[in-house]
Image (spheres, grey):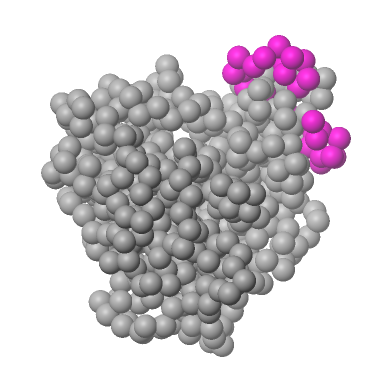
Amino acid sequence: MPLGSTAPETAARPATADPDTALSLSLLFDAVAEAVPERIALVAGARVVSYAGLRERADRLARHLVAAGIGRGEHVAILSFNRAEWVETFLGVLRAGAVPVNVNYRYVAGELRHVLADSHTVALVAEESLAATVAVVRSDLPRLRHTVLLSDGADPDDRAAVRAAFPDAVDYEIALADAPVGTALPPTSGTDHYLLYTGGTTGYPKGVLWRQADIFRAAIERRSPGAPRARSPKDVAERARSCFPQRMLVLGPLMHAAGQWNALSMLLCGKRVVLSTDRSFQAERVVSLAHREGVHTLQVVGDAMARPLARHLLTEPDLCPELSAVRSGGTPLTPPVRGLWRAWREDIALADSYGGSETGVCGSATTGDGEGLAEPLTGSPDGRSFTMGGSIAVLDERLRPLPPGSTVIGRIARTGRIPLGYYNDPIATARTFPTDDLGRRWALSGDFGTRARDGAIVLLGRGSVVINTAGEKVYPEEVEAALKAHPSVEDAIVVPAPDERLGQRVTALVSLAEGAEPDETGLLVFCRVRLAGFKVPRTVHFVDRVRRTAVGKQDYRWASSVVRDGA
């Protein structure tokens, strides 16, 4: 069925000799759970769950969904903060042969309507307080026919509204307890679908549709340097059985690629995922959790998380003795923040992972010792130069890969293991996943960059927010990195403002470190020795706080509205 169809996608395919059929995420997790059943898989608040326990509860949810009439290939949305049940639900939906749909818990009613309608969601697993917002648009979701509710201490009025909108809703724990034991679960395949909705930072979210085998290869598989790729669940099970049971604290939301992929990569190699179940980020509580659980690796989303954590550790340097690596996804760590971590522990391994919903994990910039990604990668210490795999290229306007050392700015793209396209959006699919003259399909990341002489890719930033000032292209992330290198700057975001002479002028919103005084002149002088003159902000607005999205990325829509309406 075509991607632009208005009917739900069906993942069922006839059996073939395709080796990818064995690489279903469900089959891979089952193999790991059988290999290390008693090993702890997940710590989330008061919940400590073994691999056997996680598999058992996921299977119960799968049987409930199948008994409720959820068919193979149908879409089941998950609307929840980070908690053990999010992971159970994700795995349970896969085991039922259905397709999980990630939903941002910060969405307002209109955004929820869009994602649930656009994805053709037929079932919803949601926390009660979050389901109250869905209740507002319930009448606009005719395909939604089954709801499972997670208790989260919701306000009584919210609970009443939810029960009125979803009179047949089932409590999550009751659903698991009453799941019919004899319900047959369908076979799963690596050719089944995996759907990931984008963050929607520059427009409405779009669903990126992958085959499960492809997303496993492109984003989830974690292996030692030089180790061969897993060919079957048996290989994954053996890898889990012999691995060091590393512990990673995943701070990224599971409803976003960075958090979800890091958690899945750990689970599919027999390691331990630690989740913070707090609904807001508090550095002191995160450090306490990391210390208590003895985590080895900390997954963060850029400076917004990494800076306050490093600062807190500097006040109590003896905490977290086992912490040896910090991995950032979504946005790179800046040199000043890297310096804070080095001041805390000189040998800490710091890694910036580069990738996206449409491309998977493409590469990383790593400094210090520590475990690499699927492909061992190193880059420059500024965090903006990435060494990437052979399937990644910088393309010119005719989709031709640019050679190393080219000064041409092009689009960063991936070929090979890439998505099928955007779900329910053939126009956007054709635009983002074009085919070149040689018949190769590419996934365009949306980012622009150049190819360095050593083959590394220098990331410039998103094309969707590029500033055109007097004909010169300015990538906001490059300017933001320069601003955040100033010791008085806590955070920064750069957007265009209308200009009669230049068309657009570079405008910065800056929040200051505690005790720092606004000094626009000094800040611009600082930038002029680091940036070409046309990239230096012409206007600086000092704000109390630079707003970021739920996953820690720059909120360009907010910044543009501030500039438009007057900072």
Q: Does residue 369 lie above or below 266 as drawn? A: below
Q: Position of residue 317 (x, y in %)?
A: 17, 29
Is residue 499 one of those drawn in magenta? no
Tell me: 402 left or right of 359.
left
- Tell which of 469 and 321 is nearer to you: 469
* Position in image of residue 386 (x %, y %): 32, 65
Q: Residue at x 74, y 50 (%)?
A: 118
Residue 13 in sight from this viewpoint: no
Extreme-left residue of the structure: 346
Taking 395 as reference, is 288 above or below it? above
Q: Which residue is at 32% across, 66% downward?
A: 528
x and y percent of residue 92 in the render?
A: 57, 34
Total numbered labels placed on residues in the image: 0
Q: Is residue 99 left or right of residue 21?
A: right
For the record, the magenta segment spans: 136-162
Front one among 484 and 27: 484
- Considering depth in this image, is 487 or 266 the residue closer to the camera? 487
Relative horizontal placement of residue 67, taking residue 43 as reference (left or right): right
